Amino acid sequence: MSRSGKNLYTVLKTLLGERPGSALSNEPRELYREYLEANSPTPEILAQQRQAAVNGLPIFAVAIVGEGAKQEDIKRTKDSLAAQTYSRWEFTENPKAGEWQFIMYMWPGDTLAPHALYEYAMAAEGHDLLYCDEDMLGAEGRERPAFKTAPDMITELSYDMLRSGVAVSRALHTAVGGMIGESADDRYGYNLRCLKNAASPHHIPKVLYTCGEYREVTPAARCHVEKAADRDCYVMPGEWRGSFRVDAVVKKPGVAVIINNRDSYQPLLRLLMSIDGAAEQKATIYIADRGSTDSRTLRYYDILKRNGAAKVYYGGDSGIPALFNAAAAEADADVAVFMESTVEILSHNWIGELLSQAMRSGVGAAGPKLLSSDGRLLHCGTVIGMHGWRGSPYQGSEDDRGDERKRTFTNTTRRVSALSAACMMVRMETFFNVGCFDESFCFTGFDTEFCLRMAGRGYASVYAPRALVKSYVPIASIQDAEEQDIQRCYDAMRDTLAKGDPYYNINYDYGASKPIVAVNPAPPIMLNPIYTKK
């Protein structure tokens, strides 16, 4: 319960509705204020921090940048620093001087929460880059929270996810050449260099930094992205101002499209026609059949085989992961696209868009933007823990550009925890090295488990929004799956459920499909039916 005593879900029901959010988020201001009230340290806690022993903890240097600033803005920033509960910090105009271990750049008018440097100091051990969540100072006080994700270069290359409130170790700061300039573009370039060279970056999921004004990255920052991106990639402007698209330069590899099907003649025909209509790159079609008996489906298979249009692998009553694995073993290709026969291709260059992400260094799989039959958002990457199991941001809402937060989820290339096997491209080498899909699953959840297993081996799953695919059926629900799949999903997802999805944010309400603030943030495992029964 919050300090005001209101129940979270009552607040959501009464406040959200059709109320517009701010320009940078879709939180009603009242809900965010309640979050701040419930999660800000009490005067007693602040007093304890001031009295805590801090000898041996790092010294922080703070550099205020921005020429021609108003004195009142400079004073606001300095006042927030003077109120810090942590004493081991100093101002610096010359980062090469002093005995500091971490440095943070601030702009006039920006402020730190009084416990900010204390939180940074407590989290500093073993890390060389620290950053927090932030918000913005509006006409009615603090608003527009920017909840960030775990550190990742794929997301950071798409837009400046780190933004402000970044503290960098002396060694890392020296290695990247320090901050060069004072604009938002310069900040982005510094963040990119730091994150790319950081050995152990760390996200503190607390709102500790408040911006006095919004500093927008411009298209000119493309030069910073080009320097930070891998050499085999090229950079173009992104879907929205301040974002960029980074694509791997790909020679056309061999592509196998492996389609799960059972007694679905009309959907399969529709899918194959859409693939043929978007044939910017030739792919070998493999139909993985799960024991079809429908005569029209079987006759269609014969026509496809006679014309060399597709190869059919008959798997009998095998579970979907076993069927996909067997068909992949038959395929001679560099990459595989696993698909359900109930989808339809909407974008001409869909294979190229997926390849441009799947072939980037460190990436294991890429997935498209999935739309429902009525054109609404269905899947933009999996959030583990949403509704207690898994979900996708903005599911069921319009596929529009929306506000900044919506754009970063739905129209931005970014790393996600998992993708959907309704349409997912995987490098064959990675697929077999990781161990293929887990055949102890029957029908549901094997895609999420596979992506988590890939992540454990250092391979990223990437959401590629420029590839558009329509699905005529919903994403398979774990809570409605067979008992065996439910238990296997819980076993595979339990650690992430307990901590929260690293590529979402623990401050979001996992009980909602839209990223809205949770007044009292809690691990999503608290929503899971298996956990709550224990």
Image (spheres, grey):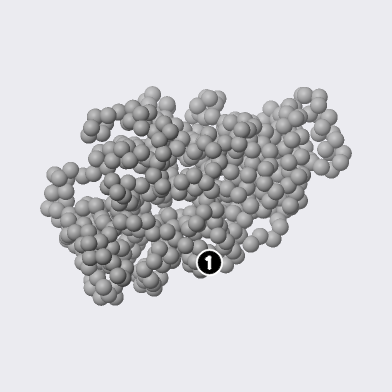
Quadrant that contains the N terminus: top left
Q: Is residue 121 left or right of residue 256?
A: left
On the image, the x and y values in percent for residue 304 come to 83, 38
Quarter of the rendering containing residue 421: top right
Q: Residue at x 47, y 62 (%)?
A: 218
On the image, the x and y values in percent for residue 337 come to 66, 45
Q: Residue at x 23, y 32 (%)?
A: 4
Asked whether residue 392 is in view, the answer is yes
Q: Is residue 200 left or right of residue 348?
A: left
On the image, the x and y values in percent for residue 259 come to 70, 38
Quadrant that contains the C terminus: top left
User: Which amino acid does the dot numbered 1 rest on?
Assistant: Glu
Q: Residue at x 36, y 47 (%)?
A: 144
Instruction: Pick the residue in front: 37 or 414.
Output: 37
Quarter of the rendering containing residue 525: top left
Q: Residue at x 49, y 29 (%)?
A: 487
Helix, strand or loop at label 1? It is helix
Q: Is residue 184 left or right of residue 470?
A: left
Instruction: Pick the residue in front: 125 or 295.
Output: 295
Q: Residue furthest right?
A: 306
Residue for badge 1? 226
- Mark 1 Cα-neighbour bin, 10 Å: few <14, some 14–19, many ≥20: some
Q: Is residue 23 above or below residue 190?
A: above
Q: Is residue 492 left or right of residue 40?
A: right
On the image, the x and y values in percent for residue 134 come to 33, 51
